Amino acid sequence: MTEAAPGATAIIEAPLTPEAAADRMAQLKEDPAFQERVAKRDPAAFEEHLKLWRVAHGLPETPQPPQSLVDVSAEADARVVAQAQRHAAALAAQGFSDSQQIQIIGRRPVPQAEHDIHVREYERLRKDAAFMQRWVAGDTEAVFTMRKHAIGKSLPIGTLDDIRAWGDDV
């Protein structure tokens, strides 16, 4: 499953890396025999998938009980950071800039007027049959535009002081 370190014997298997675990999960997802085992509720298949999922998400292969409140807090913080990083990567893949990612993930408040613009544009585009055909067909620009307005209308409405607290030049 993984390659041993240079000079290592074959007696001890090298530790599973998150990348190797994710690759193996992708292989198993395409393996009809493994999928059949999962469908039949094979405990070994579930155990293998859980182990791979945990490692792929930066967790130890087997759950470890926390040793202290600090451990619990550190694990919770690590999960929040990992989730934010995955969210940022997804937003970047959709074409959002770094500053837009920060504002979206941080739920930066917007003025009422900006919120209203996003609501109007979103509704206008939904009623535009030609635009919606492009969106349904997966047109990159149309998908980005709809996503931008959907996110914009979901951000909290804030006061000028709320917005200034973000350090933006207003």
Image: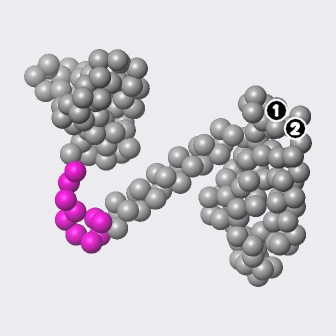
Q: Is residue 10 above or below residue 66?
A: above
Label annotation for residue 133: 1
Using residue 147 as the reference point, say whether residue 5 is left or right of it: left
Classify mark 2: helix, strand or loop: helix
The residue shown at (59%, 43%) is 89
Classify mark 1: helix, strand or loop: helix
Q: Kindly check if marks 2 and 1 are in contact, taking CB atoms under 8 A apart as contact.
A: yes
| Predominant SS along the magenta part | loop
Alpha-carbon span between mark 2 and mark 1: 6 Å
Q: Amino acid at mark 2?
A: Ala
Q: Provide residue 6's location: percent of width, then percent of height.
A: 25, 21
What span is colored magenta in the figure? 63-72
Could you say which quadrant of the image residue 158 lies in?
bottom right
Residue labelled with disc 2:
129
The residue shown at (88%, 51%) is 124
Q: Provide residue 34's location: percent of width, then percent of height.
A: 29, 22
In this rendering, does residue 114 appear at all? no
Could you say which quadrant of the image residue 95 lies in?
top right
Quadrant containing the N terminus is top left
Q: Provide residue 77's location: percent of width, then percent of height.
A: 41, 62
In this rendering, does residue 54 appear at all? yes
Q: Is residue 45 above or below residue 149?
A: above
Question: In the displayed image of the protein, which residue is found farthest to the left?
Answer: 11
Q: Is 65 in front, or is 44? A: 44
The residue shown at (10%, 22%) is 11
**Crowding at label 1, few (<14), some or many (≥20) Cα neighbours within 10 Å?**
few
Q: Is 69 in front, or is 6? A: 69
